[in-house]
């Protein structure tokens, strides 16, 4: 079985797969997004579907970009569940999993609110394959990098926040999806995790790195206040 964990975006949750079949899913509200709540929902899910942690062979994990705190909670939980076992982790890019929810055959632009007047943005096909590197940038810069003529499906909290600006800039090329479609689900992390695992994407737990795309807010504020300061070396957690 594959267990999927999503803690990078608004809702969060856990999902279980047997082969390619979704066995069950449980959501975690944003107000509950901490390690204890995630494990409580997981225990409830195991009880509901009649499975145990011992049945899990792999753990698919949304690795970001997204909430720094949420990402660390997800990784810490995955590492704890894999500790002392042979379980591998499958790192799943958050924006790639979100792109699956567009249910589109053309180009998909997942956008997450990164705050500080920026968005996390990606460009994917309908199967969640990356067509350009994910980035964190102001919306104007993201718009400049998008293909010039192709129709685009846009979704996510960043698309909701900038819905009017996107519609004005892209016109009829933009297909702005409903808000609910842009809330990342654990099942989407699991679906993409299964595909990545089949292509050799499983990793030893200690080899998994989170995809932040930018420095933590505290470090950004420090550099803004002290413009001659040297950045603190940014070492990805392992």
Image (cartoon, rainbow, N blue to C red):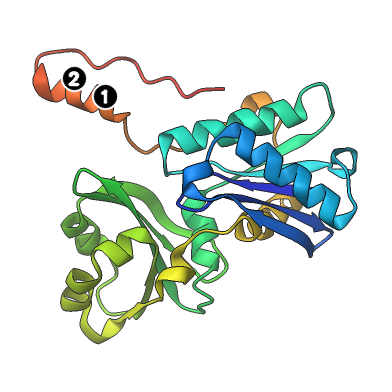
Mark on residue 222?
2
Q: Quadrant of residue 154?
A: bottom left
Task: Report how far apart the C-alphas of labels 1 and 2 lie in the structure.
Answer: 6 Å
Q: Position of residue 152 (x, y in %)?
A: 36, 76
Q: Quarter of the image holding residue 36?
A: top right
- What element does badge 2 sit on? helix
Residue at left 82%, top 48%?
46
Q: Is residue 115 above or below residue 204?
A: below
One can see residue 210 in this view:
no
Residue 9: give its label: none
Is residue 24 or residue 176 the one in the foreground? 24
Using the image, determine if residue 153 lies above or below residue 78: below
Label 2, residues with CA under 10 Å away: few <14, some 14-19, many ≥20: some
The residue positioned 29% from the left and 70% from the top of the image is 147
- Which residue is under mark 1? 218
60 is higher (above) or lower (below) than 20: above
Q: Nearer the viewer, residue 135 or 159?
A: 159
The answer to whether residue 70 is left or right of residue 148 is: right
Residue 115 position within the rendered picture, expressed as x and y whole percent measured from the top left: 26, 45
Q: Position of residue 182 (x, y in %)?
A: 44, 65
Callouts 1 and 2 close, C-beta under 8 Å: yes
Residue at figure coordinates x 55%, y 32% from the top left:
73
Pick the front one: 41 or 190: 41
């Amino acid at each position: 079985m594959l267990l999927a964990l999503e803690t990078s975006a608004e809702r969060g949750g856990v999902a279980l797969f047997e082969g390619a079949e979704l066995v069950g899913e449980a959501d975690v509200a944003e107000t509950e997004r901490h390690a204890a709540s995630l494990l409580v929902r997981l225990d409830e899910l195991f009880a509901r579907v009649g499975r145990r942690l011992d049945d899990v062979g792999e753990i698919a994990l949304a690795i970001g970009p997204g909430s720094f705190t949420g990402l660390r909670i997800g990784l810490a939980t995955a590492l704890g569940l894999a500790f002392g076992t042979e379980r591998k982790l499958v790192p799943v890019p958050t924006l790639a999993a979100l792109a699956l929810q567009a249910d589109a055959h053309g180009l998909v632009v997942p956008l997450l609110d990164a705050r500080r007047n920026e968005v996390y943005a990606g460009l994917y096909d309908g199967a969640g394959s990356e067509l350009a590197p994910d980035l964190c940038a102001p919306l104007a810069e993201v718009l400049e990098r998008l293909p010039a003529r192709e129709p685009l499906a846009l979704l996510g909290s960043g698309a909701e926040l900038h819905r009017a600006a996107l519609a004005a800039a892209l016109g009829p090329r933009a297909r702005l999806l409903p808000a609910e479609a842009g809330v990342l689900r654990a099942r989407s992390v699991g679906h993409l995790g299964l595909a990545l695992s089949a292509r050799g994407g499983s990793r030893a737990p200690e080899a998994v790195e989170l995809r932040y795309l930018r420095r933590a807010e505290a470090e950004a504020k420090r550099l803004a206040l002290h413009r001659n300061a040297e950045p603190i070396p940014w070492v990805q957690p392992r």
